[in-house]
């Protein structure tokens, strides 16, 4: 095989490989000998079909396989000879003038991983912001849990429904005097003030009594999911069958037993553990942000554009998905376009950090064990239909880069833990609000909480505005999940999304919550360096 380098510019490489017809024909002969024992032909005993007949019957398919094998072997030899570490799968193309019996000229184009300077892991100082769990925190969780387990009791006959009461009703909805799909049902129960139904619906239930019949008027929101109803006025004829009030929920052992637990003490312990887990996750997120900021500040080496492009597409796809669900999708997308350059910079930072973490991990013997890898594969395979899981697992066995992408998030977490163990860490107690504010701020510092008589100049200490739009999708970390702020961002209410045909009466003008996008593949920037020459094979289609 002859090899000629045609491009060596920055991280880009290109080569021309010439594979002789003799080498290709030798592989054809080898393939014929391999398959001959399996060929069946009338007049011949199994395994005794002459090679020339096998070649005549299956020659075209065998020649194609042999050519593909020769190209793959040639690319592997190229990688080994020039000690190339591809950033992504190489682009391999066969010359258009190739014909059977002729030499094959193959073009190989790729980007290589840069020489990454090994970062110093000495002298890293980090602050661990600790949020203690108070009895008040647990009490809040208990009360919220009790609120979700309300017991409803029929109200006296003349009781007028008020906010917090539950109304059970039959209904028939019409638009322009015509009934619409999903607008009719019986026995629907709704708590007044829950915000479950479209604006104005629940408010008009205030004051109704059991046995009342009432017609109400509402207007579907302009951004309502069902386009044929969006922005249109509607009437609903209601028949109130029950008005119910919430019974008092006592926080005792009986309440815990209703949840399948042995005692209130056990429930309290479980809730405290959950809160501690949440706090620990926030603490780790802040520490990781500061660690990655430290690494990013000291390194500015070139990174492969293809890896940046792949990472950017991951970020951009999530942003576009979120913009689709804004009140004004076009305006949201226009705002994104104006900030495209910022997100490209974030993608470049994430790629660089991924390479730095990979280098640190490799140099310090950080590994993902085979047992851990098997667990990852098993979990990933569960996302596919049962009849495609083996195919997916086989795909990972044949594609080192795909397996590396699956391994990467866990590998990075282990590298981060390794760096935490080497860093000088101090602890400081803060409130949850202060910790969340530190995560959201640009520099990760805790903004000063001002109050009357604090003695500080508010202008000097005003925190920087968090770049929420840029931080949330990318999390500014290589494998870091965005922080969810319950206090500032409500989950989408059912009235904000498209309805489906109700399965029962409870689905009236209430719609399914917006589903999050399917779990993303690990970005290429997260992959540990792994030579890959084979053209990528298509993974089985993921179930919807």
Image (spheres, helix red, strand yellow):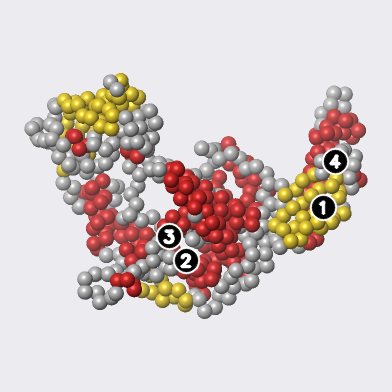
Please tell me which residue is depicted at 47% across the width and 66% down the height of the picture.
288
Please tell me which residue is depicted at 20% across the width and 52% down the height of the picture.
251
Please tell me which residue is depicted at 61% across the width and 40% down the height of the picture.
540
Give the side of residue 224 with respect to residue 217, left or right: right
Task: Give the number of the mark in front: 4 or 3.
Answer: 3
Residue annotated with mark 2: 288
Give the side of residue 373 with respect to residue 435, left or right: right
Q: Contact (CB < 8 A) between labels 4 and 3?
A: no
Task: Give the number of the mark in front: 3 or 1.
Answer: 3
The residues bearing labels 4 and 3 have C-alpha atoms spaced at a distance of 54 Å
Task: Give the number of the mark in front: 2 or 3.
Answer: 3
Q: Contact (CB < 8 A) between labels 2 and 3?
A: no
The residues bearing labels 2 and 3 have C-alpha atoms spaced at a distance of 18 Å
In the rendered structure, which disc, 2 or 1, sits on the residue that comes first in sequence? 1
Residue 370 x/y as whole percent: 60, 57
Residue annotated with mark 3: 467
Disc 3: CA contacts within 10 A as few (<14), some (14-19) or many (>=20)? few
Task: Give the number of the mark in front: 4 or 2.
Answer: 4
- Find numbered disc 4 in the image and state the secondary structure of the residue it sits on: loop
Give the side of residue 260 with respect to residue 369, left or right: left
Please tell me which residue is depicted at 28% across the width and 36% down the height of the picture.
198
Residue annotated with mark 4: 98
Q: Which mark is residue 16?
A: 1
Disc 1: CA contacts within 10 A as few (<14), some (14-19) or many (>=20)? many
């Amino acid at each position: 095989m002859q090899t000629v380098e045609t491009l060596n510019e920055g991280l880009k490489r290109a080569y021309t490989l010439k594979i002789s017809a003799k080498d290709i024909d030798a592989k054809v002969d080898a393939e014929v000998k391999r398959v001959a024992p399996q060929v069946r032909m009338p007049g011949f005993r199994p395994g005794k079909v002459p090679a020339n007949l096998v070649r005549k019957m299956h020659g075209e398919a065998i020649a194609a396989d042999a050519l593909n094998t020769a190209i793959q072997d040639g690319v592997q030899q190229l990688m080994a000879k020039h000690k190339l570490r591809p950033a992504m799968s190489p682009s391999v193309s066969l010359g258009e003038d190739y014909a059977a019996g002729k030499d094959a000229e193959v073009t190989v184009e790729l980007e290589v991983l840069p020489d990454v300077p090994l970062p110093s892991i000495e002298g890293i100082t980090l602050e661990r912001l600790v949020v203690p769990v108070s009895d008040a925190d647990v009490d809040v969780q208990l009360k919220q849990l009790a609120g979700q387990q309300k017991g409803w009791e029929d109200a006296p006959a003349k009781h007028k429904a008020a906010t917090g009461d539950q109304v059970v009703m039959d209904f028939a909805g019409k638009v322009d005097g015509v009934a619409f799909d999903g607008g009719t049902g019986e026995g629907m129960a709704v708590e007044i003030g829950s915000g479950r139904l479209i604006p104005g619906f629940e408010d008009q239930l205030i004051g109704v009594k059991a046995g009342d019949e009432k017609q109400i008027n509402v207007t579907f929101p302009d951004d309502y999911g069902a386009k044929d109803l969006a922005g249109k006025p509607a009437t609903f004829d209601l028949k109130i069958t029950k008005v119910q009030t919430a019974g008092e929920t006592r926080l005792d052992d009986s309440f815990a037993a209703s949840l399948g637990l042995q005692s209130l003490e056990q429930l309290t312990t479980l809730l405290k553990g959950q809160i501690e887990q949440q706090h620990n996750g926030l603490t780790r997120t802040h520490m990781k942000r500061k660690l990655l900021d430290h690494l990013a500040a000291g390194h500015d080496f070139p990174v492969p554009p293809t890896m940046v492009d792949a990472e950017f597409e991951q970020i951009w796809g999530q942003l576009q998905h979120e913009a689709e669900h804004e009140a004004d999708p076009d305006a949201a997308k226009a705002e994104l376009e104006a900030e495209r350059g910022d997100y490209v910079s974030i993608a470049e930072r994430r790629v660089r950090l991924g390479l730095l973490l990979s280098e640190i991990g490799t140099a310090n013997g950080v590994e993902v064990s085979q047992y851990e890898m098997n667990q990852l594969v098993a979990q990933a395979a569960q996302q596919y239909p049962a009849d495609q899981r083996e195919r997916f697992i086989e795909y990972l066995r044949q594609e080192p880069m795909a397996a590396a992408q699956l391994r990467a998030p866990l590998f990075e977490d282990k590298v981060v833990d390794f760096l935490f163990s080497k860093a000088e860490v101090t602890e400081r107690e803060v409130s949850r609000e202060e910790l969340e504010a530190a995560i959201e701020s640009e520099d990760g510092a805790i903004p000063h909480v001002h109050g009357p008589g604090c003695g500080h100049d508010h202008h000097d200490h005003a925190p920087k505005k968090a770049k929420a739009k840029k931080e949330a999708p990318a999390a500014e970390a290589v494998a870091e999940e965005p922080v969810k702020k319950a206090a500032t961002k409500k989950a989408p209410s059912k009235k904000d999304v498209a309805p489906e045909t109700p399965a029962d009466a409870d689905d009236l003008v209430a719609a399914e919550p917006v589903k999050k996008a399917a779990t993303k593949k690990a970005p290429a920037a997260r992959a540990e360096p792994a030579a890959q020459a084979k053209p990528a094979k298509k993974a089985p289609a993921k179930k919807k």
